[in-house]
Image (tube, rainbow, N blue to C red):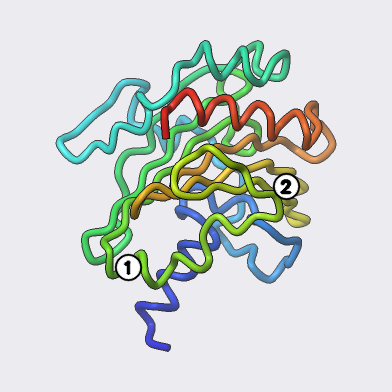
Amino acid sequence: MNKKILAIIAIAILGLGIIGSVVLGNKDDSSDTAQNKSTDTSDVAKSDNSKDEDDLGLCDLVETDVIKSSIGSTADNLTGPNNTGVTGLGDGDKGQTCVYPFVSGGSVTNSFYTDLAVYSQETFKLVSDFTANGNITVSGLGDRASFEASESTVINTTEFSLTVVQGTKVYKFVISQPEAEVTISATDAQTALTAIAMSANL
């Protein structure tokens, strides 16, 4: 397997580098790299409403009021979105992340965030088998969708994520909190994330 395929698979499994602070889908500490650190959204955000010609429109995908009402009291002090801007994933593939901290000035590890990777047909063929394969299938969203709960034992973070595949686009809707401060159950997180994703009409 060449280096390009390995890199693409790593992106599919770990998500964009900007959210690499949370291990997705397992507790294997070896997948936690130097990227696995709390990210202050003020460092990664361009501005709440920043756009450029390549903007993928991710920060306009869902309404803040929908996020708040779906998640409930955990999101009472929700801020954002903080747009990290478009990231090149190689060979013309692109990604973007929008972070909605649960507290003002908060980090991505205590937030709701959305993530989007837009692949070419060629690239998507290489990553499709590793995408939206969470342990709970969610119907009615995109071409396929799944929910999973995961933890990072390095930074003690719990993450609930809903991954939706639509064509060659891969969307993630995520609730991330410090392990000692989790305020939402997996069942409630799945319900909330599904409602948010449904509002995006995927």
Residue 54: where, in percent of width, then height?
A: 19, 40
Point out the residue furthest to the left here. 53
On-image quarter of the C terminus = top left
Q: Amino acid at mark 1?
A: Thr
Q: Please, is residue 88 above or below residue 28 in the view? A: above
Residue 31 placement, left or right of 183: left
Q: Residue at x 65, y 32 (%)?
A: 110
Kind of element beneath mark 1: helix
On-image quarter of the N terminus = bottom left
Per the model, the C-alpha gap separating discs 2 and 1 is 26 Å
Kind of element beneath mark 2: strand
> Quadrant location of residue 62?
top left
Q: Amino acid at mark 2?
A: Ala
Residue 5 placement, left or right of 72: left
Q: Residue at x 44, y 33 (%)?
A: 98
**Mark 2 nearby-residue class (10 Å; few <14, some 14–19, many ≥20):** many
Q: Please, is residue 73 above or below residue 165 in the view? A: above
Q: Residue at x 37, y 70 (%)?
A: 125
> Quadrant location of residue 43?
top left
Point out the residue furthest to the front here. 140
Residue 149 numbered mark, or none: 2
**Mark 1 nearby-residue class (10 Å; few <14, some 14–19, many ≥20):** some
Q: Please, is residue 91 above or below residue 86 in the view? A: below
Q: Residue at x 47, y 70 (%)?
A: 9
Q: Please, is residue 23 above or below residue 115 in the view? A: below
Q: Give the residue at mark 1.
A: 123
